[in-house]
Every structure is written in structure tokens, then in C-alpha cells.
Image (tube, rainbow, N blue to C red):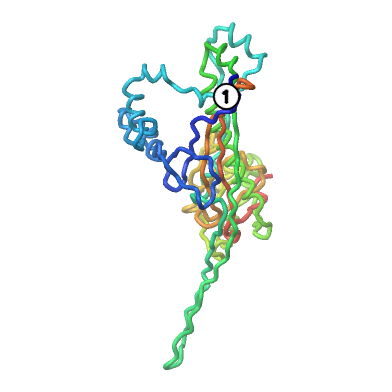
Amino acid sequence: MTSLTKEFKNPIIFNPVDHVVYMDNGKPLDDSYVYKNPILNAQSYSLAAAAKQDDPLKVTEMFYNNGTEETNYSDLANDFYSGLDKAKEKSDRSLAAAIITSKEFTTLQDTVVLGTNEELIRTGILTQLFEDVATTTLTGKYFTFANDLKYMTNLPESKSPEPTMGAVSTTTIEVPKHGGSVAITDRARQVINNGPDIFGRLVGQLQQKRALSESTIVRDAIEAIASTNNQTGVDFGVRSGSPPASTTNPIDTLIKIVDFFDATNGQWNGFVSNALPYYEYVNNDLVRGGTSNPINPVGTINESQGPFPLASGVTWFRDNLMTTLTEGYAFDKTKAGKNFRGPTRAYTVTDPDTETEKYVTKSHFACIIVDGTTIARVTGIQA
């Protein structure tokens, strides 16, 4: 009798500290976990992809050999890239995944596909606001030092100054687990044989959904800050008169934000808001230099970043994932928050009983405001 035991295939784990993908032994991610059998330097691979490396065999240098035929990944990559036809014959589709319902079978079997409309999945850019802190352990402490050392003046003769200690506060860090999966049935694999690569498309969408989830986590951390740092702004876009002209001066708000950061242990170099306040700000008559100057064109700036006009050294992040149009957040990019990024796991589970193959990915990510004194909510910037 054939066993119907589930089989775990291709378990891998990404170490965020050294940027290497390893074979995963499935053990708990605690201090005793040992990373063995490296597969790929993911950082080098990503840089090569971004640079559109023309020589595919150069990519094999980013893989590792581990002493056995099964674990000599550099040799396997060399075989793959030097013989694409052979690679297609042996390609493992375990990473391709989809849940295909019987409702879809008829369309996919009988229809000649002439084209498709790809779904637009916005991923957000909010993870770019703060620095990443790579960690292989999922709990710990983060130190924030205060600038409170003292320098004594007018010391009496033969008197040595007493030492002062810089104060430090700690934030407890716990990096939670997140995940997603998609699956393909044996029947789906048999009948879907024309049209676009549905499997690969859905795997790509799963990664986009992960990016969106992480951006949402960052947004929630920002919007949960205490209201004690509220700074009252002005409506950048309000106009009146004939012809209509701006009636508010954004400089008053900028000066207020600068004064706030002058009294903290941080520096104002970041701002985040929905896209609409940015549109209204850059077309405020006082910002663009008067009503006689051309109006700034309206383009797609959602999920983008750029200079904050009239605020030197400040980057304005625009993302419609922010929940309100009327508020923005000024912050210190290096001190206010951190993205704690732990290991990422991925594997495929085959289940003969249900005749399915499921691709699973799990990641560990947390955004924590570690110094709430260096982030401020600016209210009333849009009506």
C-alpha cells in the first residue's frame, strides 16, 4: 500500500545578516539555530539582476558548492544556464502555485488566450522610511541613548569634574511571523496547458502581497504614535478670491516643525503623507513663486519619494497607503523607527491524499518606533 505521507520539498531560509539563502533544517529559530549548506548570495544576485547582467554564467559565481552532487549549487546553476533546453526538461515547478477551481477549468482548457490584463498590486514604499536592522533572533533589546552628558564650567582650582553618564532607554523587540501560501492541484497541473504562466504569476503576486503587508505594518506603527507630538499645520491647498489664490503660508508650518526637532535628539529629514497634500503643497502659490508662474503638472506620484520643496535635506515620501489625507508625519529617518527583519523561510508541501502541492513562505518582520521623540504628527495639512 502506498504511503500518503506529506512531503516537504526544497526548504530554504534567508539569513538577513549575511544575505545568503541556505537549506533549511526546519528547526526553531532561536540562538541554537545553525545555518548550513549555503545556496545563493541573494544580495549579489539582486544587484546583478538590477544591472541586467548579460552573461548568465557570471550568475553561477553567486551560488555555493557544498561538497556533494546534490548540494553543489554552483555546479547545478552552471548546468542550468549553459543548457537551457536541458533545464526546461528538468525544471522544478514546485515554486509555481495556484488554486484553480473547477469553475476555471473550462475556460483554461477550451479558450485560446490572446492576451491578459495583469492585476495591479500596489506594494507601498513605506518600508523605505526607516533603516533595516537584520536579526537572526526574534527577541531582544534596542538601546536609545540620550544626549545628556554635561560639560562643567568655572571649575575651582585643583577640582576635577565629576563624570557624567549618558542616559539610555531600552525598547523590547519581538519580531512576529507572517506568511502566505498558494497551491496547485494535480488536476490543475494536467489540464492547464495553454495561455500565460498562471503559476509563476501567482507566485510573483504572493511576493507583492508580502511587500504590501510590510508597508502596512510600517504605516500602522507610524500612525500609532502618541498625540503629544502633534504639530498644527495649515491647509496647503485652500484658495479664495478671483482669480483664486492661495491663502495659507506653508512656511509657518515648516518653521514649527524645525523648532520641534531643534528641541529633540533628532534631525528632521523625512516626511510622509498621502499623495494629495503633496499635490496641493507644490501648487501653493507661495511655494511655486506666485500666481504668474505655471502650475506644476499633475502626474502619478503615489508610491514615490523626492525632495520637500523649501525644506532643505528633507525627503517627502508619498504613499496613498496612509489612511488620512489631512495629516503628515515628520521624522528622523535614522532614529525614529527601525525595520527589524528576521529570517525568511520557504518550502513546498506535497500531499498525495488531497492531490495538492502547496508553496509556503514565512517571514519575520516588525516596524517599531524606537524613539518617539523624533517623530511628529502634523495635522490639518489638507481639508
Q: Above or below — where is 280 with respect to 167?
A: above
Q: Residue furthest bottom?
A: 157
Say which residue label 1 marks: 357
Q: Above or below — where is 354 with respect to 287?
A: above
Number of disc labels: 1
Q: Nearer the viewer, residue 105 or 259?
A: 105
Q: Above or below — where is 57 with respect to 15?
A: above
Is residue 256 in sight in this rendering? no
Rendered image quadrant of residue 41 = top left
- Relative placement, left or right, of 380 versus 2 is right
The picture places residue 180, in percent across and down from the top left corner, at: 60, 34
Q: Residue at x 55, y 61 (%)?
A: 261
Q: Nearer the viewer, residue 211 or 301?
A: 211
Question: Where's the N terminus, which quadrant?
Answer: top right
Q: Residue furthest front?
A: 1
- Say few, some or many: other residues with alpha carbon within 10 Å of mark 1 (under 14 / 14 to 19 / 20 or more): many
Q: Nearer the viewer, residue 103 or 161?
A: 103
Q: Residue at x 58, y 17 (%)?
A: 186
The picture places residue 30, in percent across and down from the top left corner, at: 54, 50
Rendered image quadrant of residue 157 = bottom left
Assign a secondary structure to mark 1.
strand
Q: Residue at x 61, y 42 (%)?
A: 216
Q: Above or below — where is 129 with respect to 141?
A: above
Indicate the amino acid at tag 1.
Glu
The picture places residue 315, in percent across and down from the top left corner, at: 50, 48
Is residue 54 in sight in this rendering? yes
The picture places residue 168, in percent across and down from the top left corner, at: 55, 68
Q: Nearer the viewer, residue 333 or 54?
A: 54
Question: Where's the C terminus, which quadrant?
Answer: top right
